[in-house]
Amino acid sequence: MIKGFGGIFWRTKNLDVIKKWYSEVLKIEIDNWNGTIIKSQPGNETIFSFFTEDDSYFPREQQVMLNFQVYDLNETINHLEQIGVPLAKEKEIGDYGKFIWIKDPEGRLIELWEK
């Protein structure tokens, strides 16, 4: 029945700041309609997963966590260092890949993943 995700939508306190940050930090080109279309690439996966209310994987006060799959995590880390975006948690390597975390200007924890 489900073909795939149709989008991610959320409210923000400062639209211009958030658009600029996601554009500069994650290189997501935000169009005039305040969004973009991210087309699926070969090898890309979209995971839909639930966490219990008391799970500590991401902040309990944050209802949803964004996870972006990246091509090269080391290249991503270099980009973040060059523009002064600190990691919220150090790089982890595990059974599912390599991960880092950053926070957007409104404090949302964002996971970056190399499979």
Image: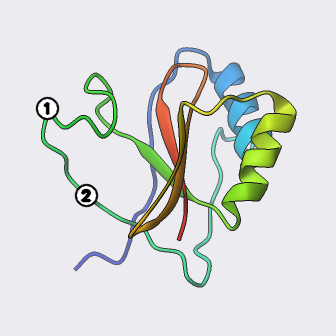
Q: Is residue 72 above or below residue 103?
A: below
Q: How many marks?
A: 2
User: Residue 105: x, y in percent?
Assistant: 61, 20
Q: Which residue is mark 2?
A: 49
Residue found at x 73% / y 57%: 74
81 to the left or right of 112: right
Is disc 1 placed on a helix, strand or loop? loop
Name the image quarter holding the N terminus.
bottom left
Residue found at x 53% / y 71%: 115
Q: Residue furthest right?
A: 82
Q: Which residue is mark 1?
A: 54
Q: Does residue 32 appear in this view?
A: no
Gap between marks 2 and 1 measured at Cα:
15 Å
Amino acid marked by disc 2: Ser
24 to the left or right of 34: right
User: Residue 23: x, y in percent?
Assistant: 75, 40
